Amino acid sequence: MKYVKNLMEEIFSIPSPGGDTSTITERLRKEFEGMGVPVTTTRKGAIMGTITGENDEEHKLISAHVDTLGAVVKEIKSNGRLRLSAIGGYAWTAYEGENLIIKTMKGKEYTGVLLPDKASIHVHSEEVRETLRTEENMEVRIDEDVHTKEDTLKLGIRVGDFVAFDTRTIFTDNGYIKSRYIDDKACVAVLFGVCKYLKDNNIKPENTVHFFLSNFEEMGHGVTAIPEKTVEMLALDIGTVGEGHTSDEHCVTICAKDSRTPYDFGFKKKLVELAEEGGIDYRVDVHYRYGSDASLSILQGVDVNFACIGPGVDATHHYERTHIDAIENNIKLVIQYII
Ligand SMILES: [Zn+2]
């Protein structure tokens, strides 16, 4: 768990908005290689570490996504500030007042913050309270001396540049993890925690396992580059904690259905039985507005059996929170599933 916590801390600090994930992917390629796990790369830039099992004819694929929400520069305004276009599904209020980094094509980085164009109550009075936040009225104030469009262009900032928001990651002494992008970086850490457990204890899994790090989940691409012998795909993705949901920040959620499809009855039942046998604290939940790499792949016609599990996370796609207990329960369930 110490390893998992350290890895989580590190990867939370690497910006990876959908479309700009090569830095985190290269870092994680080294993690696989350091464990002696062979890595393959898809044409779209996703990577997959493979550990050979006793049965090398029927493979299992376990996925977690490295891409996160974020934005690109949509327009450089006449006052030198930036209008953004969102990457992934979130409300602008979730990012109001958040620090961010703008990365230019040449790799130069500038800091800034996301604000409504009418932010100051001293200047705009009640309008600040009452205005609905939209793509049209949110803007980036760059931490540079810019007042005109030309000033911003001189910095090298262009339409299409990526914007990554600060994660504000905090690990509390009593085990809570507060951060943006616990979805799905916590699950990436779970995936590596499982790999490390197998390697450190010299355990050969029952079946060959592909550990797949997808890089366009938030945009709903799914995983289609699945090795031919794969019979089951288990997506690791967050359980949504909140009103009307069973998910809990201390438990692993087994997803019964999301907004795209119910998950397979037999596969779900197997996961529930494994959790009960292993004394793992779990919940079965139905996700309301949600798709996982597993459900998205299935909808694209991939012929494998499919399931989704993940740590319970509060305030998803906002300033998220989970507890280290949920991460541990998740790791235990994946281990039960593959050994
Ligand atoms: Zn996710």
Image: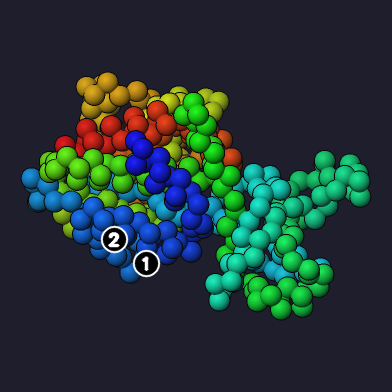
Where's residue 13, x and y in %?
50, 52
> For mark 1, what is the residue?
44
Where's residue 312, x and y in %?
44, 32
Where's residue 287, x and y in %?
46, 35
The residue tagged with tag 1: helix, strand or loop?
loop
Q: Is residue 289 above or below residue 64?
A: above
> For mark 2, what is the residue?
225
The residue tagged with tag 2: helix, strand or loop?
loop
Q: Say which label, 2 or 1, has the lower sequence index.
A: 1
Q: Nearer the viewer, mark 2 or mark 1?
A: 1
Look at the image and tell me in which quarter the N terminus lies.
top left
Cβ of mark 2 under 8 A from ligand 1: no
- Three-letter amino acid code of the residue under disc 2: Ala
Q: Is residue 118 visible?
A: yes
Q: Residue at x 74, y 66 (%)?
A: 144
Q: Residue at x 23, y 27 (%)?
A: 274
Residues tagged 2 and 1 counted as in contact (Cβ below 8 A): yes
C-alpha gap between disc 2 and disc 1: 9 Å
Where's residue 233, x and y in %?
27, 46
Q: Is residue 41 above or below residue 292?
A: below
Along the line of sight, the residue nearer the viewer: 272 or 197: 197
